[in-house]
Image (spheres, rainbow, N blue to C red):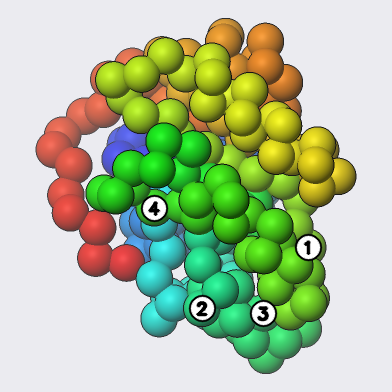
């Protein structure tokens, strides 16, 4: 996760060979990666933060994978944006495994309907993503995500962050979202998302 990191930290990660980066916000990612995109062979950018439908076209233009598909309206917006530029959009469905009202993600019981709608819209659904509740053990949430993925024949599981990635790996994570483990604590205040 390269969000909020200064350019020198990103440059150091690139020099060390890192080529997959996650960003939370479209506008921040555009300013960080827009000018570098063509110069970096093998670079893969993944949107790991919530996405509003009015930013779908910008997200499709910049990111290789959108990990936060959580509603039909967004699936339709991503499909339309991809069709306009001739790009097949790769997505992960974000699952709200804890049914937290303040958190994005489709509820576990509604995952199948969203996957079907996304596939009907010609999106490539590669897998699932979740962020367990902060005050609960992550293992049961990772196990639930794995179970849902298997039910739908999905092989990609994006789960686990710096504090729980080892648990996530034990439960089958194929992608983990680590930032502070690699870069140290964030430098500066988080600002509210305007994406």
Between 13 and 60, the residue placed more toward the observer is: 60
In the image, taking residue 5 as reference, residue 64 lies left or right, namely right
Query: Which mark, residue 21?
Result: none
| Relative image position of residue 139 (x, y in whole percent) | 54, 15
Q: Earlier in the sequence, mark 2 or mark 1?
A: 2
Of the residues tagged 1 and 4, which is closer to the observer?
A: 4
Q: Position of residue 156 (x, y in %)?
A: 75, 38
**Residue 79 badge:** 3
**Residue at image x 13%, y 38%?**
189
First reached walking from the N terminus: tag 1 or tag 3: 3
Residue sitting at 72 percent across and 46 percent down?
127
Residue at the spot of label 1:
124
Mark 3 or mark 2: which is in front?
Answer: 2
Q: CA distance from mark 3 to mark 4?
A: 20 Å
Mark 4, Cα crowd under 10 Å, few <14 / some 14-19 / many 20+, is many
Residue placed most toward the observer, 74 or 97 = 97
Is residue 95 or residue 7 the one in the foreground? 95
Q: Quadrant of residue 7?
A: top left
Q: Earlier in the sequence, mark 3 or mark 4?
A: 3
* Picture disc at residue 104: 4
Q: Which residue is mark 2?
A: 73
Task: Determine the secondary structure under disc 4.
Answer: loop
Judging from the image, what secondary structure is the residue with disc 3 in? helix
The image quadrant that residue 79 belongs to is: bottom right
CA–CA distance in space, label 4 to label 2: 14 Å
């Amino acid at each position: 996760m390269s969000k909020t990191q200064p350019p020198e930290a990103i440059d150091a990660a690139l020099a060390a060979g890192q080529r997959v980066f996650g960003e939370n916000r479209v506008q921040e990612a555009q300013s960080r990666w827009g000018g570098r995109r063509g110069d970096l062979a093998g670079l893969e950018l993944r949107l790991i933060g919530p996405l509003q439908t009015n930013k779908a076209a910008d997200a499709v233009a910049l990111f290789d994978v959108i990990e936060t598909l959580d509603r039909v309206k967004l699936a339709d917006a991503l499909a339309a944006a991809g069709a306009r530029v001739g790009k097949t959009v790769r997505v992960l469905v974000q699952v709200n495994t804890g049914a937290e009202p303040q958190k994005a993600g489709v509820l576990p019981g509604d995952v199948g309907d969203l996957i079907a709608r996304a596939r009907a819209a010609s999106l490539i659904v590669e897998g699932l993503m979740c962020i367990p509740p902060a005050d609960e053990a992550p293992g049961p949430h990772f196990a639930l995500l794995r179970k849902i993925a298997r039910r739908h024949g999905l092989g990609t599981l994006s789960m686990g962050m710096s504090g729980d990635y080892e648990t996530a790996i034990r439960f089958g994570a194929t992608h983990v979202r680590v930032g502070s483990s690699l870069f140290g604590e964030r430098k500066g205040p988080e600002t509210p998302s305007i994406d």
